[in-house]
Image (cartoon, rainbow, N blue to C red):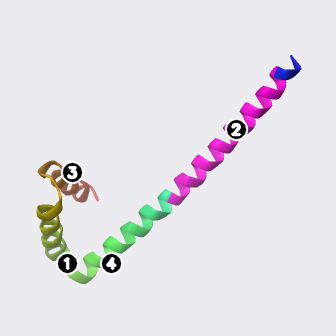
Amino acid sequence: MKESKQTDNVDTAKRDNFIARAKAESERMNKEIEKSKAKRDRLHEEFGESRLTQWRNEHAAEVLTPQQAALVDQSYQHA
């Protein structure tokens, strides 16, 4: 029984550590998303929608598959 209790404590510590790391990573990713949105907004203000769309389409034609390009287009429609 004592060994089981020690194992439970180790498992609890591992779980708590995992949850803490997951929360920290989630917070970090949310900050990165906000930075990305702010950068996109600045570019939009500076160059306008038509120029950004032109660049996005040029990039898509050079490096993305048609399916990937469609996903990129979808992501900008929801932004």
Q: Work out whether residue 20 or residue 44 is closer to the camera in this orientation and state it.
A: 20
Do tag 3 and tag 2 residues touch (Cβ < 8 Å)?
Answer: no
Up/down of 57 relative to 67, above or below: below
User: Which-is-in-front pick, marks 3 and 4?
Assistant: 3
Q: Would you name the residue on which mark 4 appears?
A: 42
Residue at image x 78%, y 27%? Answer: 7
Q: Amino acid at mark 1?
A: Gly
Please state the horizontal and vertical placement of residue 22, each as a whole percent of the image: 58, 47
Upstream in sequence: badge 2 or badge 4? 2
At 53% from the left and 59% from the top, the residue drawn is: 28
Which of the marked residues, 1 or 2, is nearer the chain's N terminus?
2
Question: What's the CA distance linking mark 1 and mark 2?
Answer: 49 Å
Q: Residue at x 62, y 49 (%)?
A: 21
Marker count (numbered): 4
Residue 52 appears left or right of 18: left
Q: CA distance from mark 1 to mark 4?
A: 10 Å
Crowding around mark 1 (Cα neighbors within 10 Å: few <14, some 14 to 19, many 20+) is few
Mark 1, residue position: 48
Of all residues, the one furthest to the bottom in this rendering is 46
Q: Earlier in the sequence, mark 3 or mark 2?
A: 2
User: Which span of residues is magenta-colored?
Assistant: 4-28
The reply, left or right, for residue 44 in relation to residue 19 is: left
Disc 3 and disc 2: Cα gap in Å?
A: 37 Å
**Image spot of residue 47 (x, y percent):** 21, 81
Q: Residue under circle 3? A: 71
Q: Amino acid at mark 2?
A: Lys
Badge 2 is on which residue?
Answer: 14
Question: How far apart are the alpha carbons under marks 3 and 4?
Answer: 22 Å
Give the foreground label among 3 and 2. 2
Secondary structure type for disc 3: helix
Indicate the quadrant where residue 48 lies: bottom left
